[in-house]
Amino acid sequence: MSKFIEGKVVAKRRWAERLYSLQVKAGIALFQAGQFIKLALDIDGEVVAHPYSFVNAPGEKPLEFYFIEGPDGLLTQRLAALEAGDTILIAPNAAGFLTLAEVPDAKHLWLLSTGTGIGPFLSILKTAEPWQRFERIVLAHGVRHANELAYGETIHGFAQQHGEQFRFVPFVSREETDFALCARIPEAIADGRLEARAGVALAPENSQVMLCGNPDMLRDTTETLLARGLKKNRRSAPGHITVESYW
């Protein structure tokens, strides 16, 4: 089987400076919500690839990917320059374990993200499973500036459809707003601000936590949760904290 197949860019959206999403039409295998797949381009005769999480749910078309254009990112700069109708390379099969199939049952599901790490959680929340399994779902999204809080319409849709079962907690770390917590996620866990805003307790006896974002957030939040008595979730030893980093 070929390492990559061809896809077509259907649309591109610029959310903020250096933040983009691409919608892609491609005949890939079925995936699980929360997984990622490799996108690639032929750049000067070399195929350059990187994994990106799906924003769309399984079965939802077109495929959608949310990414940041890195100042030194050869691939992301080329992805940001693509337009509708352009060809893109994509792996035929997805991978990754940031899925609800890997998460034990609990009353509350916490989806904690920074930056483009919100993507796989949007994919998960577009499916029926989380709403059937968990009494309360908290989605937190941390960014530096308020204009980087993307997918507001999608998140508002979750709130309208699911009411008190869903709570969205935005974090903006580098400017004051009248709606977001001005903090980093691990700090707001440690001092109780996240739970106060969410209206539910984050504790080993009632919570499962999924993390996706920059490495510093993953490390610091995991340490904060471990200090609270939560444990890393492994197939061989089920726990409370599910993390997958492909930075």
Image (tube, rainbow, N blue to C red):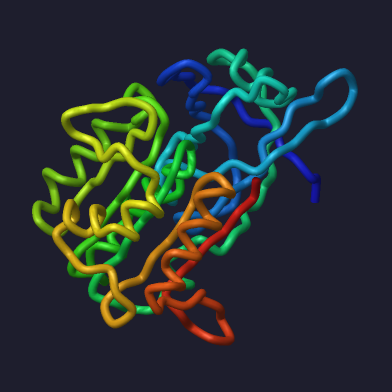
* Relative vertical location of residue 187 with respect to residue 231 in this rendering, above or below: above
Residue at image point 80% right, 25% down: 42
Q: Nearer the viewer, residue 147 or 164?
A: 147
Residue at image point 29% right, 77% down: 106
Q: Nearer the viewer, residue 42 or 7?
A: 42
When asked about the image quadrant of residue 186, the answer is bottom left
* Relative vertical location of residue 205 with respect to residue 13 in this rendering, above or below: below
Residue farthest to the front, as pictured: 191
Q: For the C terminus, which image quadrant?
A: top right
Where residue 161 appears, as percent x and y from the top left, is 13, 48
Where residue 156 appears, as percent x and y from the top left, is 19, 38
Residue at image point 56% right, 81% down: 235
* Relative vertical location of residue 96 with respect to residue 9 in this rendering, above or below: below
Left or right: 233, with 138 as reference point = right
Where residue 99 appears, as percent x and y from the top left, is 47, 63
When asked about the image quadrant of residue 191, the answer is bottom left
Left or right: 177, with 119 as reference point = left
When asked about the image quadrant of residue 8, the answer is top right
